[in-house]
Image (cartoon, rainbow, N blue to C red):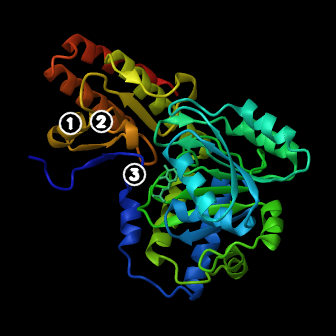
Amino acid sequence: MAIQQKLSLMIPGPTPVPEKVLQALSKHPIGHRSKEFQDLVQSTTKNLQWLHQTQNDVLTITGSGTAAMEAGIINTLSRGDKVICGENGKFGERWVKVAKEFGLEVIKIDSEWGIPLDPEEFRKVLEEDKHKEIKAVILTHSETSTGVINDLETISSYIRKHNTALSIVDCVTSLGACNVPVDEWKLDIVASGSQKGYMIPPGLSFISMSQKAWEAAEKSNLPKFYLNLKSYKKSLQSNSNPYTPAVNLVFALDEALKMMREEGLDNIFRRHNKHKLAMSNAVKALNLKLFADEKYLSPSITAIKTEGMDAEEFRKTIKNNFDILLAGGQDHLKGKIFRVGHLGYVNDRDIITVVSAIGNTLLKMRKISAQQVGEALVVVSKYLEEK
Ligand SMILES: *Cc1c(COP(=O)(O)O)cnc(C)c1O
């Protein structure tokens, strides 16, 4: 039987939370109109801009990642606007639904789940749009449902050439895991959420808005009130919020961002890359197959095929025997894949442990030999040693 409170979260959110951040959360709340809180907002805003590598406004919303994405869409677009939606997984699918719900005309660019979106298709559709009718390109950078990273840098370069369309990007599992230089790539709208790379519990989301996005906001006619970003921008001028924010989550955010600054962006990216390589190569050594195209693996999640065994049963066994929570497959992938999250507050030990747990379980099922389990761990240590 599992020991209580020793659960290891290896899912792509909520992710593990450091002790310091938990302590910040447990403080008594303070008034959100107080000078003390305003100082906190000033500090978190500055550090959020650092994390996004941008001079743009980065706004904090009380709500999950979906709130930030929806805000990006409804604040800059109008009923009937033509948009491109990139779709190669569950989250891409969600943004198509949101766009349609608000009466946008969606041009879908898709690829099979597990395969990255083809930037050339975006180039073609954008180049053919001579009358500049396309108002936005909406896409997911790291597709959490499949463990694929889309080539955002190339796609955003085509969006810039188009010159009219805004980029509205879900960076929920890429921000704080790999390089997302908002200013360098000229990304207009970037959404993320607290329970992913930020190392804090669910409840806050973030949205970065470029000058061009604010200009579009002047013309947008879609209905909005709580998520009207102009109110957030106005309040932020005095380091405040339009409505009562999740005060304790802001305490946590401040602590987590300070920890991230201490580690440094390059080190954070290197750590995630190293864990991605260790995990994906160990999977192969364990005689399992990666679900995603190996050249486009997400830095934060590895999706693994379980041909000939039920992935849900496998996950349950790992949870019962080792207290490690893995993620399952969604929709048609349920039972066919499981996913290992390695996002946020994850260290080398977590990777060694999860590979050992998977290896041991396969060994007990007589799927692999003890030697193969050993070899997988040698592979892991080889990648973990890389600086
Ligand atoms: C987690 C996640 C979201 C946000 O989902 P919420 O449940 O609203 O926080 C959005 N996109 C991706 C790619 C995600 O992984």
Residue on which disc 1 sits? 313
Q: Which mark is residue 335?
A: 2
- The one of 24 and 120 positioned closer to us in this rendering: 120
Using residue 365 as the reference point, say whether residue 80 is left or right of it: right
User: What is the spatial separation of the Cα atoms under label 2 and label 3, in whole angstroms?
Assistant: 22 Å
Specify the amino acid type for callout 3.
Thr
The answer to which image quadrant residue 219 occupies is bottom right
Looking at the image, tell me whether mark 2 or mark 3 is earlier in sequence order: 3
- The one of 247 and 19 positioned closer to us in this rendering: 247
Give me the residue at 67% from left, 31% from top: 118
Task: Tell me: residue 258, above or below residue 151.
Answer: below
Residue 330 appears in the picture as rendered? no
Q: Is mark 1 within 8 Å of ligand 1?
A: no
Residue 202, given in percent of the width and then of the height, sits at 43, 63
Q: Secondary structure at mark 1?
A: helix
User: What is the spatial separation of the Cα atoms under label 3 and label 1, in whole angstroms?
Assistant: 22 Å
